[in-house]
Amino acid sequence: MTAPKNSFATERGRYYRDPAGGPDLISVTNVLSTAVHKPALVPWGAGLVADAVIANPIEIARRARSEPTKLRRELVALPNANRERASNLGTRVHHRAHAIVIGAPFPADPEVEPYAVQLAKFFRLWRIDFERDVEAVETTVLHRRYGYAGTGDLWVWLPTGLYGRRQLWLVDYKTSQKKPATTVYAEQPYQLAAYRHAEVALLPDDTEMPAPRPRRTAVLNLRPRSHRLIELPSGRPVFRAFLGALRSSRHLHDSPAEFPSILPPWAPGSTTRKAA
């Protein structure tokens, strides 16, 4: 995951500082990770552990006898370690994509290059002229009234309207080494809706402008050997659903970490008020 300007990490996830000096704004991805159920994560993590055990049965059996605590700790950590590696790769792919669009140099990265090739194929397929067709790239958008912020990947004009008229699209890059290029997840429309309905966009010097108003939204799934542009809904009904997740996320973040236990009035140490 990229770390955009003005964003910062907290124990409750990512937030954004408001350059205008207002309250901190919760990140869109923070909302989705906190308040949206992701049922695929549990079997995915269990599968990683199972694969590690199946691939190394003799070594696992030996360590289960000689150092069970350390082995358990390493197996439990496998899903998070794998997720961090995937996130790091996604961040590098995003940086490479940004460099392609703005024509900036980028250091050699053999692991990233297959995704860059697929992105270049997407640009060629749609005959995208960066000067003419790209409206914004890697741009942070805010909605102060609802208190959230996020950074979109690409706003681009595509000839998808009637008689080939250009329409403004918001496109979010998604990378994976193994998932099919047709894969989508339930929370992705929420992310696109949040960006689509934001009110303000920040320029690199933190000056403000009205946020771009895309007509359509999509994820661009980048894989080492393929890519797919998949349109996803992001209209008002989806935005209202995102706002529900936003409220849930704020409630969870504002809840205390611990709650007091209650004892009857006659128990030692009780703080319950006794009847007069």
Image: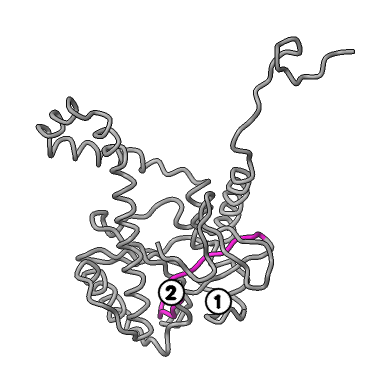
Residue placed furthest toward the right: 276
233 or 192: nearer the viewer: 192
* Amino acid type of the residue tagged 2 in the rendering: Leu
Does 33 sit above or below residue 182? above
Mark 1 to mark 2 CA distance (whole Å): 11 Å
**Horizontal relation, residue 154 to residue 51: left or right:** right
| Principal secondary structure, stretch drawn in magenta | strand
Q: Name the residue under label 1.
A: 212
Identify which residue is drawn at 37% across, 66% down.
173
Does 65 sit above or below residue 222? above
* Amino acid type of the residue tagged 1 in the rendering: Pro
Residue range highlighted in magenta: 146-160
Q: Position of residue 234 (x, y in %)?
A: 51, 61
**Horizontal relation, residue 156 to residue 51: left or right:** right
The quarter holding residue 142 reads bottom right
Identify which residue is drawn at 29% across, 56% down.
85
* Label 1 secondary element: loop
**Horizontal relation, residue 97 to residue 210: left or right:** left
Quarter of the image with the C terminus in it: top right
Q: Where is residue 104 in the image (x, y as percent from the top left)?
A: 34, 85
Residue 23 in magenta? no
Labelled disc at residue 154: 2
- Count all numbered tags in the image, as a single digit: 2
The quarter holding residue 3 reads bottom left
Q: Position of residue 1 (x, y in %)?
A: 40, 61
